[in-house]
Image (tube, grey):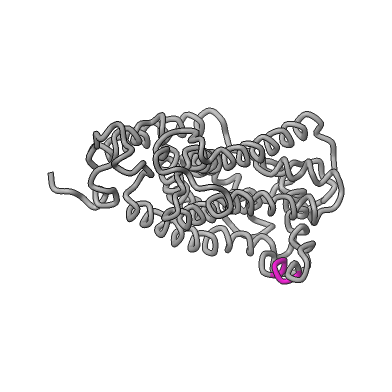
Amino acid sequence: MRPSFFHHLHPPTIPAQQSRWRYTLGAGGIALFLALVLGFTGILEMFYYAPNPQDAPLSVQTIAFHVPFGWLIRNLHYWAAQLLVIFSAIHLIRVVFTGAYARSRRFNYLLGMVLFVLVILFDFTGYILRWDIDICWPLLTGTNLIKTIPWVGGFLYMLAIGGDQACTTAMLRFYTWHIFGLSLVFIIILIWHIFRVRRDGGIAVAPPPYRRNTTRIDRSELLRREVLAMLIVGAFLILLASFFPAPIAPAITGKPDPAAETEAPWFFLWVQQMLKWGSPLLWGVGVPLLFLVLISGIPYFLPQTDPSELGRWFPKSNRAAQILLAAIGTLIVILSLIFLLTRTKI
């Protein structure tokens, strides 16, 4: 069979042992599939969504309750966004816990980190676009945190919000960032990331002298496995969308109320918990930025994985990276659980 465009996106062959589900977890390919679902469903939602504070909540309800199959499209968009955050995190964990960031791949690791941050920003801006009472606290607190950044906070706030009153200008700015600004950067970085994965030969694997299993599979088999993963995830996504509707709450009337008893998106609950402790600059900006810098710097500041240990889980030579990521991840989970268990208003 003559190779198609999709075949040429993959290396001609890859090691069979490192192509197994239990090694890759399929996280990278699934994340790409979810990004495509988000793009497709997002375009369909644009036909009915009204990006202004007066009409946005009504347009969301129109999509959910009046547009034929609009409920399905909205639910697919919502759940694909949540799963994309999860599978992006799983992909990051897999890369670190297998030491797959050799010196030649560490820049691509940074590109992956940029994509992960963009996914979070996508999810947050999409969350705000509902413009219902559940987004009051995240909107005002999240935007005000930007102001606390020394020297550049005011500029970044104006760039993100476009004015002094979040309720008057944030809607259009968040919509523009969500649909155009973030999307353009995401597409460019994603293509760059995929290109570098393809150029580096696909999956990180030990050099030939260290390989115990030299069996390889061709790209047709790899593509078949990817299509199978997409079908499984797609079916699961449809089930989620069919039985678990995306959240929808009453519209905001007037200005957002910062005292409203609402929660941040689930992936920011740990930040909301830390904000109870005091300084917004320290707990809301400093600590998350520190975590991001530490994780991004793993290929540059911590020992490289020994070439003989590449292509398997938990190599001993990068134990420090595993401990660092596990510690940060565990702390985030614990803080999120503490918030859910206490649920006290900030």
Q: With 54 as the anchor, is 338 left or right in this view? A: right
| Front-lying residue, 306 or 32 | 306
- Quadrant in which residue 16 is drawn: top left
Quarter where residue 269 is shown: top right
- State the image coordinates of residue 213 (x, y, percent, origin top left): 28, 32
What is the x, y in percent for residue 188?
44, 62
Q: Residue at x 53, y 51 (%)?
A: 299
Residue at x 46%, y 41% (from the top left corner): 68
For the N terminus, the quadrant is: top left
The spot of residue 207 in percent (x, y) is 33, 44
**Is 275 situated above or below 327?**
below
Which quadrant would residue 89 be assigned to in this image? top right
Q: Position of residue 342 (x, y in %)?
A: 81, 31
Counting the numbered discs, the total is 0
Q: Is residue 138 a member of the stretch shown in magenta?
A: no
Which secondary structure class fits the magenta region best? helix
User: Which residues are the magenta region?
Assistant: 154-158
Of all residues, the one furthest to the front in this rendering is 209
User: Can you name the residue that lies furthest to the left here?
Assistant: 1
